[in-house]
Amino acid sequence: MLFYNPYISWYSEQSNIVSHNPFILFATTIVMNQPLETVPDEVLAQRAKAGDRLAFEVLCDRSLPAVYNRLRALLPPEAVEDVTQEVFLAVVQAIPRYQQRASFRTWITGITRHKVADYYRQRGRQPVTSLEIVGEDPPGPEGWEEQAAVRLALRELPDHYQDVLLLRFSEALSFEEIAGTLHINLEAAKSRYRRALAALGERMKVEG
């Protein structure tokens, strides 16, 4: 599902890559000589911003599963692939302006969030069905994410509640992993998750 591939050549043209530029060659060599999993996203993002195509491809490969699963949880199934392509096209266009004020993950999550908002703004609110959440954890991704009521309620939650729920269910992260991703401690991650789940349930009651 490498939806971003059609835009790689466009990225190369737009990023003013000079094949004999010593800085670009040096940066690319550093990335290539390290195991890819050891190169932080933010380092790769800076290389991509400078025109390093390899770094950009690695970032896209890393980001695609999280972006795709997030969109599956927020959009109707038939819209997921198209919006995924829109997200990565936006990444191609925006990477030259990337500023490391937040993590790359936070940056691409913001782009994804904007594309979801664009999708619903262009089409308006759709009729929804109801879904009852029982217990601490709602059904897994193959169940709840396909429900229109959950999608609608989820996208109306504050961003920090959306994030913790999507990390838990769309990306199947443990609470320890969620805490690390959000840069909060374990108890704060669990507390935010419980509050987010309660808010989701209340939101669905309103919608129902």
Image: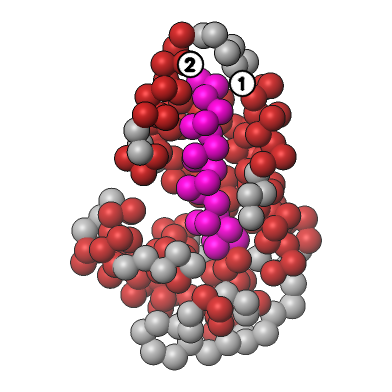
Judge left or right: residue 76 versus residue 151.
right
Q: Can residue 161 be seen in this view?
A: no
Observer-nearest of 5 and 16: 5
Say which quadrant the C terminus sits in: bottom right
* Residue depth check, mark 1 versus mark 2: number of the one nearer the observer: 2
Using a 10 Å C-alpha cutoff, classify the residue at mark 2 as few (fewer than 14 neighbours), some (14 to 19) or many (20 or more).
Answer: some
Check disc 2 and report the residue beneath it.
Answer: 24
Mark 1 and mark 2: Cα distance apart in space: 11 Å
- Depth check: give the residue in front, 193 or 202: 193
Whether the residues at callouts 1 and 2 have beta carbons within 8 Å, the answer is: no
Left or right of 199 on screen, residue 125: right
Majority SS type along the magenta span:
helix
Q: Dot 1 corresponds to which residue?
A: 15
- Where residue 65 is drawn, which disc sits there? none
Residue at 34% across / 33% down in the picture? Answer: 34
x, y percent for residue 130: 62, 87
Q: State which tag comes first along the sequence, 1 or 2.
A: 1
Q: Does residue 13 sit above or below 73 in this rendering?
A: above
Residues shaded magenta = 50-71
Residue 110, image x, y percentages: 52, 47
Quadrant of residue 169 in the image? bottom left
Q: Is residue 122 above or below residue 22?
A: below
* Quadrant of the rendering where the N terminus is positioned: bottom right
Q: Is residue 196 visible?
A: yes
Q: Does the magenta stretch include residue 41?
A: no
Amino acid, disc 1: Ser
- Quadrant in the rendering for residue 204: bottom right
Element class at badge 2: helix
Towards the viewer: 78 or 40: 40
Question: At label 2, which amino acid type do we have?
Answer: Ile
Kindly identify the residue that appears in the image at 53 percent across and 89 percent down. 132
